[in-house]
Amino acid sequence: MAIMQRSQEPLDASPRPRRASRLGLRKSLEQIEAESASHGLKRSLGALNLTMLGVGSTIGAGIYVMTGTAAANYAGPAILLSFLIAGLACLFTALSYGELASTMPVAGSAYTYAYTSMGELAAWIVGWLLLLEYGISCAGVASGFSGYATSLLHDFGLDLPAWMSIPYVQTLPGPHGSTLLQVGDGVNIVGAVAPLVVTVLLVIGVQESAIVNTLIVVLKVSVLLLFVALGLKEVHPSNWVPFIPPNEGAFRYGIPGIFRAASVIFFAYVGFEAVSTASAEAKNPKRDVPIGIIASLAACTVVYLCVAAVMTGVVPFRTLGVADPLAVAVDAMHQHWLALFVKIGAVTGLCSVMLVLQYGQTRIFYTMARDGLLPRMFCTLHQGFRTPWIGTIVVGVAVSASTALLPIDIISDLVSIGTAAAFGIVSFTVIWQRNARRDLKPPFPVPLGGIRIRGVWIGIVPMLGIVFSLIMVVPLLADMFTALVNRNPIPALLLLSYVVLGIVCYVAYGYRHSRLAAETAAAHRVEAP
């Protein structure tokens, strides 16, 4: 008996329209609505589940590692201002996501939004960028999980060989600030196992995965709140003076450091975007998805601010530039039992991040495969579980292999650049949609309205989202350029290689198998005299 079914298999794309028209082919809202009604996925997620998905994806590596790094290297105690700036930037994008998700309740997130506004080529580019944001960053989270899990096992008297928690390829500092790669003696088995466990949960079903995620979120948030409650009495106000340390050059402290730290923290918030990838499996997406997006962003902002304030108040900010800054603060509080709880919270918290990131990546690939831009295996549904099981397994194995073999830390800024581009496109899509369909009444419209310039509506919130996306990414590009000048071409080469690989994949497969192109060609044949 067959155990799978095809969900709207891509059609044969021959003959094809002219090349110039192909790159700008757009989906209509009517097509999006039709896909939403026939996607085949099980609708089982309510507003609480969606909020927990967002919180589960956001509160992870950002709070356990990046907050300390940003404070020690860029902002000092003014990391609180960085959080406010990043939170405000994310709010504008989140509101745009809310409007689009309520109008287009499909699984493709920014990929689908780009398909309606800028066409097929732009949609492919966004989908390729989202692979950085979800798939590649998930491997980085798994690497962080490996470090905390190894430390936790040590506390219980189980010491694993070092080779089991380090990747096969490692990075070393080279001359003139360059980064060298070398083959080591390890394979990060500890980190590689975690994505495989997450894969099993996602194959079984999104509802079951959401229940596990909710339990994990409750645990890790409780641990963080316990850290805040016990740490308040250990805070030394002198550690907050000066609140904005003097600038030491480039983006280290001072006002520039605040914005550089914000660019790091901005992308620690990106979990709220994962809520939009669950639109196709939400019970009432037009209401619940905007609620999940805004609620998860608000909850994470409050938790981040509280933890950062206590962390920088308990110990001098310069001591936080380590892989486990929370542990440094806990040790200074002389609460040894709390250190164990923090590590448990970190391990479980990073598991929930991997769960949501892999979930989001599989749903984006699922939508792209339905459109014919990826092989059909990514949209093959299991008959019993109603999940894209083959695509989920492929993504899980790829993430696991990347964790075991690669030094993910050298592409962290590339992930951030890809996320910024996706955020800017989402905000632009709101403006485009409002002008293209003036009769459309979004169930969740962005607030503050907009202005009309020569008949073109320009929303205040979407424009601010675009502006803040640019502000957040400028320091990242500046650092990449500085590395290139200092004879460290690896970040730039990685970005270029990734772009070239995306182009090759689109030309070799997506361009030839596009469902929309096939339907457009068929319509042209029918209309021809």
Image (tube, rainbow, N blue to C red):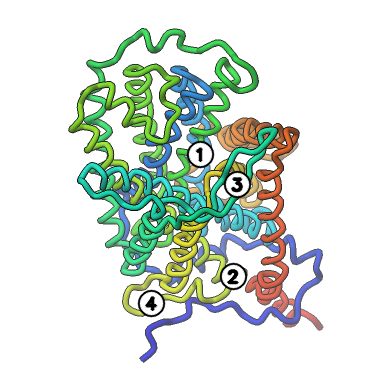
Disc number lying in front (3 or 4): 3
Q: Residues within 10 Å of mark 4 (few under 14, many from 20)?
A: some
Q: Residue at x 37, y 48 (%)?
A: 145
Residue type for callout 1: Phe
Can you give x and y, in whole percent of width and height, for residue 278 in the image?
Answer: 41, 57
> Which residue position is annotated with label 1?
267
Residue type for callout 2: Leu
Q: What label does residue 71 carry, if any?
A: none
| Quarter of the rendering occupied by the N terminus | bottom left
CA distance for labels 1 and 2: 27 Å
> Which residue position is annotated with label 3?
418
Classify 173 as above or below 383: above
Can you give x and y, in whole percent of width and height, for residue 498 in the image?
Answer: 66, 55
CA distance for labels 3 and 4: 31 Å
Q: Secondary structure at mark 3?
A: helix
Q: Residue at x 75, y 66 (%)?
A: 22
Q: Secondary structure at mark 1?
A: loop
Q: Earlier in the sequence, mark 1 or mark 2?
A: 1
Residue type for callout 3: Gly
Residue type for callout 4: His
Q: Residue at x 26, y 47 (%)?
A: 153
CA distance for labels 3 and 1: 10 Å
Give whichever of 217, 17 is nearer the camera.
217
CA distance for labels 4 and 2: 18 Å
Q: What label does residue 374 carry, if any?
A: 2
